[in-house]
């Protein structure tokens, strides 16, 4: 049996994905530090009044954004299938916690610089992330690996929206200033749509097609079959 040594190339994608999450993870760590230190400002008063959803969101997205990229290292996944399954058991609840705590914050916090349009976008994409993870989990329980991968990629793409939104916001911030209202909503939408488009491209060009269910046979044999 030939053992294939790991190559540097297989780690490029996980490394890039972890780098994409760097800014949101650092921002989340800063928010947790503020809460722990009692550094209350006009901008974060709502988090001090109800810290549970934001703390759950930050911890779960940190776990999700650091662990999930390693699931895309094909060679590592094939050499250590036990690790892949164990990480998946942690990623499913972490991903659901990200989505559901995001919805919790959307409805539970007063966001003075956000618009109703952004709340609607968060409702759509948060629900879509949770649904994708549930469908991915259901698929792997059926041993439908192709659909499992496709749905998990979709859920991950939505969850990493904050990383891409940093880049959609950056030019506007540098040229105009901090976006608010519907402008902020549309810039965030752009980040989600970019991620979803990339995910669908990967699913359609890089993954095997999901297997089709076999057609049901006739309940009663025809005369020609007898």
Image (spheres, rainbow, N blue to C red):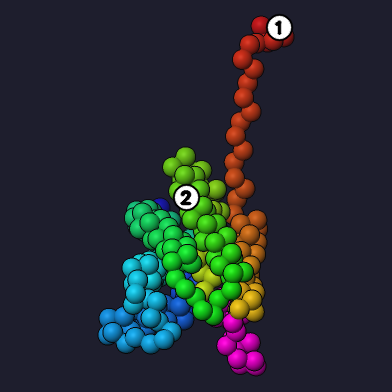
Q: How would you classify the magenta stretch by its main secondary structure?
A: helix
The residue tagged 1 is 223
Tell me if mark 1 has few (under 14), some (14-19) or many (20+) residues whose alpha carbon lies within 10 angstroms of its own: few
Looking at the rendered image, the disc whose residue lies closer to the viewer, 2 or 1, is 2
Q: Which residue is drawn at 54% across and 70% down?
A: 161
Would you identify the image quadrant in which residue 167 lies? bottom right
Specify whether 176 is left or right of 34.
right
SS assignment at label 2: helix
Tell me which numbered mark, 2 or 1, is placed earlier along the sequence: 2
Specify whether 189 is left or right of 11.
right
Q: Nearer the viewer, residue 221 or 56?
A: 56
Residue farthest toward the left in the current orientation of the protein: 37
SS assignment at label 1: helix
Answer whether residue 3 is visible to the viewer in this image. Answer: no
Residue farthest toward the bottom in the current orientation of the protein: 175
On the image, the x and y values in percent for residue 194 come to 63, 70
Magenta segment includes 143: no
Which range of residues does the magenta coloring cover? Answer: 163-180
- Decide: is 111 above or below 174: above
Q: Nearer the viewer, residue 199 or 32?
A: 32
Q: Which residue is drawn at 49% across and 75% down?
A: 111
On the image, the x and y values in percent for residue 65 come to 43, 69
Q: What is the distance, in whole Å, between disc 2 and disc 1 at their CAs? A: 45 Å
The numbered disc on residue 134 is: 2
Specify whether 176 is left or right of 98.
right
Would you identify the image quadrant in which residue 157 lies? bottom right
């Amino acid at each position: 049996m030939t053992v294939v040594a790991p190559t540097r190339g297989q780690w490029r994608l996980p490394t890039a994905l972890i780098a994409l999450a760097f800014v949101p993870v650092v921002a989340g760590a800063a928010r947790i530090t503020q809460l722990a230190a009692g550094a209350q400002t006009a901008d974060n008063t709502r988090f001090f009044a109800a810290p549970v959803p934001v703390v759950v969101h930050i911890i779960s997205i940190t776990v999700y954004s650091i662990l999930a990229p390693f699931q895309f290292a094909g060679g590592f996944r094939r050499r250590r299938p036990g690790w892949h399954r164990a990480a998946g058991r942690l990623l499913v609840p972490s991903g659901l916690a990200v989505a559901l705590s995001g919805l919790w914050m959307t409805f539970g916090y007063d966001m003075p610089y956000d618009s109703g349009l952004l709340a609607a976008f968060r409702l759509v994409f948060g629900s879509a992330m949770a649904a994708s993870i549930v469908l991915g989990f259901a698929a792997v329980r059926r041993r439908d690996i192709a659909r499992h991968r496709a749905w998990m990629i979709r859920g991950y793409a939505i969850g990493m929206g904050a990383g891409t939104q940093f880049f959609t916001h950056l030019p506007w911030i540098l040229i105009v200033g901090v976006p608010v209202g519907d402008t902020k909503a549309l810039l965030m939408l752009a980040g989600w749509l970019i991620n979803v488009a990339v995910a669908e491209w990967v699913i359609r060009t890089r993954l095997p097609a999901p297997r089709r269910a076999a057609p049901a046979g006739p309940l009663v044999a025809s005369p020609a079959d007898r």
